[in-house]
Image (cartoon, rainbow, N blue to C red):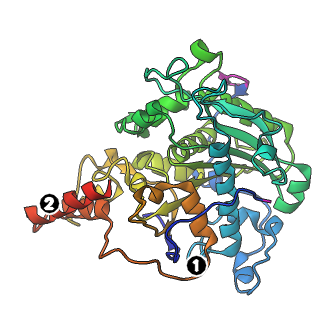
Amino acid sequence: MATRGMVPRPTINHTGFPTEVRSHSYPFGQVHLPKKTTTPKQSLVNFASVAAPSMAAAAASTSYDYNLACFWREIQGLNNWENLVEPLHPLLRKEIIRYGEFVAACYKAFDLDPNSKRYLNCKYGKRSMLREIGMEDCGYQVTKYFYATPDINIPIPNGESCGRWIGYVAVASDDAVKLLGRRDIMITFRGTVTNPEWITNFMSSLTPARLDPHDPRLDVKVEAGFLSLYTSDENDKFGLGSCRQQLLSEVSRLLNEYKGEDVTITLAGHSMGSSLAVLLAYDIAELGLNRKEMDGEIPVTVFSFGGPRVGNSAFKERCEDLGVKVLRIVNVNDPITKLPGVFFNEKFKVLGGKFELPWSCSCYAHVGVEIVLDFFNMQNPSCVHDLETYIGLLKCRKRARMQKYGDRVDFLDKASELFLSAQNINMFPWIEVASNMVNMF
């Protein structure tokens, strides 16, 4: 079960977001997969050979000014964020907000004007994008844009169906390295915007990932729509490889460029984008691209904002075996975080608390450690999934309670618990839950 940390509700009805923030080898583009070795499982989780100073001592201090250069390994999940989630450590909070703002940059730079020549693409060039949205002092340089197209044909005003620009890769500058303590390679993904992407989100069947050519691992399954968006080839349409090929090629190039330095691979995404971030993190680790030549591994960490489930329990276990670290920031009232697998999920392994189900391995399961936010606005229910709301909640440190709108409950969880209890089932609670869910949407 994922670790949970609760962040209190603020006394606000809507959260604003500031506009300015200060050789067996198989070719994938330019990527060459390393030869498989018989490295024991436990060595795969080794983040660094040099131990970082303990944050326990730092947490005892009343000062919020911690040195990230000393504690970055633990912030990146070295110890699965033990003792950092509840209560939420100030330095971890700051880093979550920072990566959330990099994801928000995707939305700010995404062109949704059907009359624009850059429709469904980034409004700006790589060199100017961060400056144009007010993040010129962020300490990162954009190195690549990447694109994705669902394998679904729906006409759009300016041509064929396409998801087009979906995020960017950036790397920490030399000055930022001094503050961060390492060279951070960051990949950020926006969430669902176009109609084909929404359809992709609802393709909720599990299919084998088959991302490792050495070992397909047919028991490791992921949601078909996310996998399609990640692997669909764009050569015929735009002269590009798949989203996967674009990203593996750039990650491989950057890792080679900064060989010999302390490097981290940080992925951040919102909604559908967080699913793609988890898929890429798993892919990098499964292929061994983060494996150092001599010893140890480059940390691979995902900061997920309002993300759905990605795969089954075998996928979750494999991510853990590979040392992929996922920190999920979740609004308890956000229905997207309960999909897919509203009923058939990690809670469905045992029926009525007694009987193991034979098909439980086919149920969806969340990956990683969870930080739980709590926000709801009856006048604007859609804000429960809004990235700006997520970031605003994290910025609110005061322990305050927001106005209550009746005795509200988490309806999807309530329905799931009723379904799994297998006892005292009657129609009235189901009618109540269905009615509440209809009102919610």
Which x, y percent locates residue 373? 50, 68
Instruction: Indicate whether 114 appears above or below 41.
Output: above
Magenta residue span: 22-30
Instruction: Indicate whether 421 appears above or below 365.
Output: below
- Which residue is identified by label 1? 87
- Which residue is identified by label 2? 431
Residue shown at 44% from the left, 50% from the top: 308
Q: Which of the pair 26/43 is nearer the observer?
A: 26
Tell me, yes or no, if residue 309 can be seen here.
yes
The answer to whether 372 appears left or right of 143 in the picture is left
Of discs 2 and 1, which sits in the foreground? 2
Q: Earlier in the sequence, mark 2 or mark 1?
A: 1
Which x, y percent locates residue 11? 51, 77
The answer to whether 233 appears left or right of 431 in the picture is right
Q: Which of the pair 87/128 is nearer the observer?
A: 128
Q: Quadrant of residue 212?
A: top right
Which x, y percent locates residue 89? 65, 75
The answer to whether 428 appears left or right of 217 in the picture is left
Q: Residues within 10 Å of mark 1 (few under 14, many from 20)?
A: few
- For the stretch drawn in magenta, what is the main secondary structure? loop
- Is residue 24 inside the magenta stretch? yes
Residue shown at 60% from the left, 76% from the top: 83
